[in-house]
Image (cartoon, helix red, strand yellow):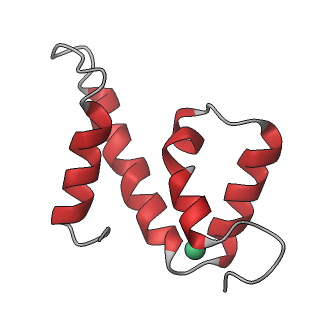
Amino acid sequence: MNSHEGLDCASAMARLWDYLDGELTPEKVAAVREHLAECADCLPHARFAERFLGELGRCKECQPPMPGTLRDKVMSTLRSEGLMS
Ligand SMILES: [Zn+2]
Protein backbone atom coordinates (compact mmCIF):
# COMPACT_ATOMS: atom_id res chain seq x y z
CA MET A 1 0.00 0.00 0.00
CA ASN A 2 2.98 2.28 0.43
CA SER A 3 4.92 1.54 -2.71
CA HIS A 4 3.50 4.04 -5.16
CA GLU A 5 4.94 7.48 -5.84
CA GLY A 6 3.04 9.18 -3.04
CA LEU A 7 3.77 9.27 0.65
CA ASP A 8 4.50 6.15 2.62
CA CYS A 9 2.67 5.58 5.88
CA ALA A 10 5.40 7.02 8.09
CA SER A 11 5.60 10.21 6.03
CA ALA A 12 1.84 10.57 5.94
CA MET A 13 1.57 10.17 9.71
CA ALA A 14 4.49 12.53 10.28
CA ARG A 15 2.59 15.18 8.34
CA LEU A 16 -0.82 14.37 9.73
CA TRP A 17 -0.85 17.06 12.40
CA ASP A 18 0.36 19.79 10.11
CA TYR A 19 -2.18 18.56 7.60
CA LEU A 20 -4.98 18.89 10.12
CA ASP A 21 -3.63 22.25 11.29
CA GLY A 22 -3.72 23.49 7.70
CA GLU A 23 0.00 24.24 7.82
CA LEU A 24 1.07 22.32 4.74
CA THR A 25 1.51 23.56 1.22
CA PRO A 26 -1.33 22.64 -1.18
CA GLU A 27 0.95 20.05 -2.80
CA LYS A 28 1.63 18.34 0.53
CA VAL A 29 -2.01 18.54 1.54
CA ALA A 30 -2.88 16.78 -1.70
CA ALA A 31 -0.23 14.12 -1.08
CA VAL A 32 -1.49 13.40 2.43
CA ARG A 33 -5.11 13.39 1.29
CA GLU A 34 -4.21 11.05 -1.54
CA HIS A 35 -2.47 8.69 0.84
CA LEU A 36 -5.38 8.69 3.27
CA ALA A 37 -7.78 7.96 0.43
CA GLU A 38 -5.80 4.88 -0.51
CA CYS A 39 -4.50 3.62 2.81
CA ALA A 40 -6.78 1.65 5.10
CA ASP A 41 -4.11 1.72 7.81
CA CYS A 42 -3.72 5.48 8.06
CA LEU A 43 -7.28 6.59 7.50
CA PRO A 44 -8.55 5.51 10.96
CA HIS A 45 -5.65 7.40 12.53
CA ALA A 46 -6.53 10.51 10.59
CA ARG A 47 -10.21 10.23 11.42
CA PHE A 48 -9.43 9.83 15.09
CA ALA A 49 -6.98 12.72 15.13
CA GLU A 50 -9.43 14.93 13.27
CA ARG A 51 -12.17 14.17 15.75
CA PHE A 52 -9.82 14.65 18.67
CA LEU A 53 -8.66 18.05 17.43
CA GLY A 54 -12.28 18.97 16.82
CA GLU A 55 -13.09 18.22 20.44
CA LEU A 56 -10.12 20.25 21.61
CA GLY A 57 -11.09 23.10 19.33
CA ARG A 58 -14.54 23.22 20.83
CA CYS A 59 -12.99 23.61 24.28
CA LYS A 60 -10.63 26.42 23.34
CA GLU A 61 -12.96 29.01 24.79
CA CYS A 62 -13.65 27.19 28.03
CA GLN A 63 -10.12 26.43 29.15
CA PRO A 64 -6.66 27.99 28.93
CA PRO A 65 -4.82 27.07 25.77
CA MET A 66 -1.94 24.67 26.19
CA PRO A 67 0.51 25.40 23.38
CA GLY A 68 3.38 22.95 23.19
CA THR A 69 1.68 20.30 25.25
CA LEU A 70 -1.18 19.82 22.85
CA ARG A 71 0.68 17.51 20.53
CA ASP A 72 2.03 15.45 23.43
CA LYS A 73 -1.48 15.15 24.77
CA VAL A 74 -2.80 14.00 21.41
CA MET A 75 0.05 11.56 20.94
CA SER A 76 -0.41 9.99 24.37
CA THR A 77 -4.13 9.70 23.74
CA LEU A 78 -3.46 8.01 20.42
CA ARG A 79 -1.15 5.56 22.16
CA SER A 80 -3.68 4.82 24.86
CA GLU A 81 -6.25 4.21 22.15
CA GLY A 82 -3.85 1.75 20.54
CA LEU A 83 -3.68 3.82 17.38
CA MET A 84 0.01 4.53 17.59
CA SER A 85 2.92 2.40 18.75
ZN1 LIG B 1 -0.72 4.64 5.20
* Nearer to me, 56 or 42: 42
The quarter holding residue 19 reads top right
User: At 55% across and 81% down in the image, what residue appears?
Assistant: 40
Quarter of the image with the N terminus is bottom right
Position of 54 with respect to 66 (left or right) is right
Q: Quadrant of ligand 1?
A: bottom right
* Residue 30 in picture, x, y percent from top left: 77, 52
Position of 80 with respect to 29 (left or right) is left
Quarter of the image with the C terminus is bottom left
Establish if 48 lies above or below 70. Answer: below
User: At 68% across and 77% down in the image, what residue appears?
Assistant: 38
Position of 78 with respect to 24 (left or right) is left
* Residue 7 in picture, x, y percent from top left: 71, 66
* Residue 80 in picture, x, y percent from top left: 15, 64
Establish if 34 lies above or below 14. Answer: below
* Nearer to me, 61 or 22: 22
Query: How many numbered circles are shown?
Result: 0
User: At 51% across and 59% down in the image, what residue appears?
Assistant: 13
* Residue 69 in picture, x, y percent from top left: 24, 30
Establish if 47 lies above or below 19. Answer: below
User: At 68% across and 36% down in the image, what residue appears?
Assistant: 24
